[in-house]
Image: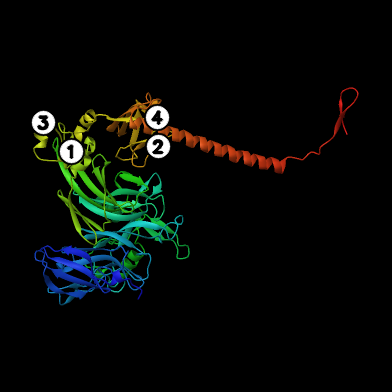
C-alpha cells in the first residue's frame, strides 16, 4: 500500500501511566495500532494486545497527541482522548474518544465520540502537538490550514489553534450524534511587532505556584518552514486567559456561504437560553436541535489567545526550535514565592539543546546554556528538580538538570541557574547544596549578579598586527552589546557581530589594544584585555612573531594581487569600450608653408 518498511515495524507510540502505576501503551504493529497493558514494576503483560484505531498512528511524520484521563468522564469511567488523522490517505481528521467500556472492559457503556468527517470548519489538515486535562475540560494544541477567517486573511495559510471539549460530553441525540457538542477553538497569537510566528511546534505545561492556581503553557513557534532564514520564538499562555476567551469572548460567524467571509458576533448577542457554545452540560443528549445547530455554526472564537506580556519571552533568528520541556523552582525571598521556570528547548537543525530561565513575575527570560548533542533526539522528558531524559531510537540518556560545571567561568549564568552556585575562592560553578546559602564564599542566586561582575577578571590575549580574533560571549544575542575602552562597538569593516553574541576583530592594528567587554542587560558577561605586539614585527624574534609577519605579508600580497586584478580588468574593459565607441579619424598629410604654418592636404 506504499508504506515504508519502518512504518510496518513494531513501534511504541504512546505510553500512559495509570493511577495504580500500570503502563498502558499504544503500538503500531504491521499498520495495525494496538493497545497493551503491562505491570509498572515488572513490565509483565497484564492483558493481550488488541487492535484500537484512533489512539496512535503508524505513519511517520504525522504529529498526533493522546492523553489518558481517569476522572471527570461519564460515569467516572477511564478514557483516552486523542488528536489524530486516520485512513489510507489520512482523510479522517479527529479529536476522538473511543467507546467507554465497563471496568472489566467487556461491555460498551457509551459509544465513541469524534469530530465530523469532511467538515474542514472543525479541523483542516491538523498537526497536533499536545493535549492536557484540567477540571472539566480537555485541551488540544495544534496547527492547521486556515479556512474560517475574515476576508483579509489568506485561505490555506497555516495557523495555530487551541481547542477545548468537555469530558462529560455524550454528543447529541439526533443532531451531532456521536459528535462533540462542546467543541470550540481559538487562535493562538505569538507575534513580535506585527511579525507572526504562526506555526506551533511543541507545548509543555507547568503549574504556577501562586494564589491564582493557574497553569501556564510554554510553546515553541516558527515563522515559516524550509527556508534558510528560519525564525523561532517561545510564547507562554495562561489557562485563566484561555478559559476567559472560551467562556466570555465573542464568536466568529459566517456571513454567507457564498462570500466565505466571517464576522465577529459579540458575546452579548448570543442569546440561546442557558446554552453558550463550549459549555458543559449534565447530559448533552438533552440539548435541543436549535442549540446544537447554533453550536455547529459557532466553533471558532472571534478573539485570539494572547501570550503573557503580549510578546514572546524569547525569539531567535536562523533557528528551528521544536521540542520543549519545563520544570519549576521556588525561592523564598522576603516571604514571597518567586516563580522561576527552567526550560529545555531542542533546536532541530543544529542538533543543540538550549537551557533558558524564565522569571514569571518579572517577565524576563535568560539564555543560560547551549549543549551540542551527538545524536538527534526524538523525545524529551523531565523528572522535576532532578533529571532530564533525552531519547532516540537506540537509547535513553539521563542528565542532571544542573550541568553546573558546563558554565565554566561564566559566574552570571551560574548564579541565575536555580540548581547551581558559584564558588568565589575556586572561581567555578557547582551543583547547589543546601549549605551554600549560609556558607561564606558562595554566590547562590540572582541577587549575586552584581558580585559576579566584580569578580570577572579580563582574559589577556596577545596578538599581532594583521591577525583576526574571535571574542566569544554566550548569551541572548538580542540583548548583548560590546564595549571597547568605554565606547559601544558597532558592526563595520573592522568588526563582525556573530549570531551567537560573539565579536570577530578583523585585520588587527595597534589601535585594537585595550579592554573589550561583553554585556547583557548591562551585566558583564566576559572581558578581554587585548595587547597588540607591533614593536618586534620589523625584527621578529619568536616563532609567533615570524608567523604574524608572514600573515601580514600574505595579507598585503593578497591585497596587491586583488588590486592588480581589478586594474587589469578595468584596463581591458576600458580598452574594449574605446575600440567600440571612439570614432576613427582618417589620417591627413600636412606640409609647412612659407610662413612656417602647417596646412592639411
Residue, disc 1: 429
- Residue 141 percent across, percent down from the top left: 29, 58
Question: Could you tell whether 447 is left or right of 180 in the image?
Answer: left
Q: Earlier in the sequence, mark 4 or mark 1?
A: 1
Question: Could you tell whether 206 is left or right of 554 in the image?
Answer: left
Residue count near mark 3 (Cα–Cα under 10 Å), binned few <14, some 14–19, many ≥20: few
- Residue 584 percent across, percent down from the top left: 77, 40
Q: Relative to residue 65, is residue 348 depicted above or below?
A: above
Q: Earlier in the sequence, mark 4 or mark 3?
A: 3
Residue 411 visible to an observer of this rendering = yes
- In the image, which is nearer the foreground, mark 3 or mark 2? 2
Residues under numbered marks 2 and 1 in contact, where contact means CB atoms less than 8 Å apart: no
Residue, disc 3: 440
Residues under numbered marks 4 and 3 in contact, where contact means CB atoms less than 8 Å apart: no
Rounded to the nearest angstrom, the CA distance separating label 4 from label 3 is 45 Å
Rounded to the nearest angstrom, the CA distance separating label 3 from label 2 is 41 Å
Rounded to the nearest angstrom, the CA distance separating label 4 from label 1 is 36 Å
Residue count near mark 1 (Cα–Cα under 10 Å), binned few <14, some 14–19, many ≥20: many
Q: Earlier in the sequence, mark 2 or mark 1?
A: 1
> Element type at marker 1?
strand
Q: Relative to residue 78, is residue 570 depicted above or below?
A: above
Rounded to the nearest angstrom, the CA distance separating label 4 from label 2 is 18 Å
Residue in the foreground of this view, choosing between 437 and 490:
490
Residue count near mark 4 (Cα–Cα under 10 Å), binned few <14, some 14–19, many ≥20: many
Rounded to the nearest angstrom, the CA distance separating label 3 from label 1 is 15 Å
Q: Relative to residue 153, is residue 561 depicted above or below?
A: above
Residue, disc 4: 465
What mark, if any, has residue 496 been given in the picture?
2
Amino acid at each position: 500500500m506504499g508504506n515504508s518498511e519502518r512504518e510496518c515495524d513494531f513501534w511504541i507510540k504512546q505510553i500512559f501511566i495509570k493511577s495504580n502505576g500500570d503502563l498502558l501503551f499504544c503500538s503500531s504493529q504491521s499498520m495495525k495500532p494496538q493497545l497493551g497493558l503491562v505491570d509498572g514494576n515488572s513490565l509483565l503483560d497484564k492483558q493481550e494486545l488488541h487492535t484500537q484505531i484512533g489512539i496512535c498512528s503508524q505513519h511517520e511524520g504525522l504529529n498526533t497527541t493522546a492523553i489518558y484521563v481517569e476522572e471527570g468522564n461519564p460515569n467516572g469511567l477511564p478514557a483516552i482522548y486523542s488528536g489524530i488523522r486516520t485512513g489510507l490517505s489520512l482523510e479522517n481528521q479527529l479529536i476522538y474518544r473511543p467507546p467507554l467500556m465497563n471496568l472489566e472492559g467487556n461491555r460498551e457503556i457509551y459509544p465513541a465520540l469524534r469530530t465530523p468527517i469532511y467538515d474542514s470548519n472543525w479541523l483542516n489538515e491538523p498537526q497536533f502537538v499536545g493535549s492536557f486535562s484540567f477540571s472539566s475540560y480537555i485541551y488540544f494544541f495544534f496547527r492547521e490550514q486556515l479556512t474560517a477567517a475574515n476576508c483579509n486573511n489568506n485561505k490555506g495559510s497555516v495557523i495555530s489553534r487551541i481547542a477545548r471539549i468537555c469530558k462529560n460530553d455524550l454528543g447529541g441525540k439526533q443532531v451531532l450524534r456521536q459528535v462533540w457538542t462542546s467543541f470550540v477553538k481559538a487562535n493562538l497569537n505569538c507575534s513580535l511587532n506585527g511579525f507572526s510566528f504562526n506555526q506551533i511546534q511543541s507545548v509543555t505545561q507547568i503549574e504556577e505556584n501562586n494564589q491564582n492556581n493557574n497553569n501556564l503553557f510554554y510553546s515553541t513557534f516558527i515563522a515559516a518552514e524550509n527556508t534558510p532564514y528560519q525564525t523561532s520564538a517561545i510564547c507562554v499562555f495562561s489557562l485563566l486567559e484561555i478559559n476567559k476567551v472560551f467562556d466570555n469572548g465573542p464568536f466568529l460567524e459566517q456571513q454567507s456561504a457564498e462570500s466565505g467571509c466571517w464576522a465577529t458576533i459579540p458575546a452579548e448577542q448570543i442569546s440561546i437560553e442557558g446554552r453558550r457554545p463550549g459549555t458543559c452540560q449534565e447530559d448533552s443528549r438533552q440539548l435541543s436541535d436549535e442549540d446544537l445547530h447554533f453550536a455547529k455554526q459557532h466553533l471558532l472564537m472571534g478573539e485570539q489567545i494572547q501570550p503573557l506580556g503580549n510578546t514572546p519571552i524569547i525569539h531567535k533568528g536562523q533557528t528551528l526550535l521544536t521540542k520543549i520541556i519545563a520544570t519549576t523552582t521556588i525561592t523564598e525571598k522576603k516571604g514571597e514565592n518567586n516563580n522561576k521556570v527552567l526550560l529545555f528547548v531542542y533546536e532541530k537543525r543544529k542538533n543543540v539543546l538550549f537551557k533558558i530561565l524564565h522569571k514569571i513575575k518579572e517577565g524576563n527570560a535568560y539564555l543560560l546554556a547551549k549543549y551540542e548533542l551527538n545524536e538527534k533526539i526524538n523525545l524529551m522528558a523531565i523528572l522535576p528538580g532532578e533529571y532530564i531524559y533525552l531519547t532516540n531510537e537506540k537509547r535513553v540518556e539521563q542528565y542532571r538538570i544542573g550541568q553546573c560545571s558546563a558554565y565554566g567561568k561564566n559566574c552570571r549564568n551560574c548564579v541565575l541557574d536555580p540548581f547551581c552556585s558559584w564558588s568565589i575562592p575556586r572561581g567555578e560553578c557547582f551543583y547547589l547544596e543546601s549549605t551554600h546559602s549560609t556558607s561564606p564564599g558562595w554566590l547562590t542566586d540572582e541577587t549575586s549578579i552584581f558580585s559576579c561582575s566584580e569578580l570577572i577578571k579580563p582574559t589577556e590575549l596577545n596578538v599581532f598586527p594583521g591577525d583576526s580574533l574571535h571574542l566569544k560571549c554566550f548569551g541572548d544575542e538580542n540583548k548583548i552589546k560590546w564595549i571597547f575602552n568605554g565606547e559601544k562597538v558597532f558592526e563595520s569593516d573592522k568588526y563582525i557581530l556573530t549570531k551567537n553574541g560573539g565579536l570577530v576583530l578583523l585585520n588587527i592594528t595597534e589601535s585594537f589594544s585595550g579592554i573589550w567587554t561583553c554585556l547583557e542587560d548591562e551585566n558583564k558577561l566576559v572581558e578581554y584585555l587585548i595587547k597588540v605586539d607591533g614593536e618586534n614585527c620589523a625584527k621578529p624574534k619568536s616563532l609567533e612573531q615570524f608567523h604574524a609577519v608572514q600573515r601580514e605579508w600574505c595579507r598585503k600580497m593578497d591585497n596587491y594581487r586583488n588590486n592588480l586584478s581589478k586594474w587589469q580588468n578595468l584596463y581591458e574593459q576600458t580598452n574594449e569600450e574605446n575600440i567600440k565607441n571612439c570614432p576613427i579619424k582618417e589620417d591627413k598629410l600636412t606640409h609647412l608653408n612659407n610662413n612656417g604654418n602647417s596646412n592639411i592636404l
